[in-house]
Amino acid sequence: EDYQEEVDISHFVTRPPVVTIMGHVDHGKTSLLDKIRSSKVASGEAGGITQHISAYTIEQSGQKITFVDTPGHAAFSAMRARGADVTDIVIIVVAADDGVMPQTEEVISHAKASGCPIIVAVNKMDKETANMDMVKAQMAEREMTPVDWGGDVEFIGVSAHTGMGIDDLLENILLQAEILELKADPKAKVKAAVVEASLEKGRGPVATVIVQNGILRLGDNIVCDTTYGRVKAITNDLGKPVKELGLSETGTVLGLNEVPAAGAIMVGQDSDKEARDIATKRAEHARAKELSKSTK
Ligand code: GDP
């Protein structure tokens, strides 16, 4: 309600796609995310990759793609419910040896409900027991018919172990993104979605965000649900300090007074007073609501 979408089409530029990977446990979601990241980061920066992170941005053929790791399907739905639907494209990962499993079915329904274009990454193609046709048949039965079978879903065979098919997958993402014509306004008031947040020793509240509109800059006054503050430091997904995050880019932000919830929307304000006032009002409102609930 605080964020007035300042729609000025003349400012619109193409923004990079934000991609979520979902799949049945052990089908290789984490391995795939890690492989994509490590194979695309400049070799000099590889040292920055120390652990698995919740979001990162890579470059493929000179174009950016941001990947988000939603810890579970529940989190994905919760974020959507809160309006933080950061995802433009969903990748469903299915292990080529296991095929469709119960959680794959769940993921299919979540992905369909999101309305995002879906790409199926058939992982573990390096295995001898890999069976692409089996996966295609199982998916086709669930209204996910492959393009080469007359449907509209792209199936890409990949291996998170060998790296096979990863470039294909990324090129396909860019193709889908082109069709979507993703636009945003870099001159608008900044709006970013919180993917993850925590309290870190010596740093205070740290929020990992994805920029949805505008540009997030050092010194920006921000509100995020009932939390507020001034952007004190920004680090990119390699842990390097940066001065700003552009459209669809991800990084961590320091400077909020408290830890916001995942899915919260961070919005730029004109002054620190404005930011504080909005956050305080919201906190009071939330408290009043809690109180009326407990007295019922
Ligand atoms: P997640 O639960 O979906 O995140 O799955 P993980 O990424 O943790 O992978 C589950 C298991 O499958 C691990 O033992 C991985 O080493 C293995 N795995 C993942 N990708 C591949 C692949 O492309 N080929 C093979 N052979 N094994 C894989």
Image (tube, rainbow, N blue to C red):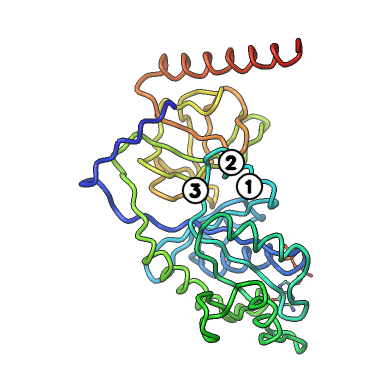
The answer to whether residue 35 of the structure is visible from this angle is: yes
Residue topped by disc 2: 81
| For marks 1 and 3 on the same chain, the one whose residue lies earlier in the sequence | 1
Quadrant where the image shows the C terminus: top right
Secondary element at tag 2: helix
Query: Label 2: few (<14), some or many (≥20) within 10 Å?
Result: few
- Depth check: 215 or 8 in front? 8
Residue topped by disc 1: 77
Residue topped by disc 3: 250
The residue at the far left in this view is 10
The reply to whether discs 2 and 1 touch (Cβ–Cβ < 8 Å) is yes
- Depth check: 59 or 187 in front? 187
Q: Mark 2 or 3, which is nearer the eye?
A: 2
Q: CA distance from mark 2 to mark 1?
A: 6 Å
Q: Which mark is residue 213?
A: none
Q: CA distance from mark 1 to mark 3?
A: 20 Å
What amino acid is at disc 3?
Thr
- Depth check: 271 or 291 in front? 291
Q: Position of residue 163 (x, y in %)?
A: 60, 77
Q: Quadrant of ligand 1?
A: bottom right
Q: From the Cβ of disc 3, is ligand 1 less than 8 Å away?
A: no
Query: Label 3: few (<14), some or many (≥20) within 10 Å?
Result: many
Q: Mark 1 or 3, which is nearer the eye?
A: 1
Quadrant where the image shows the N terminus: top left
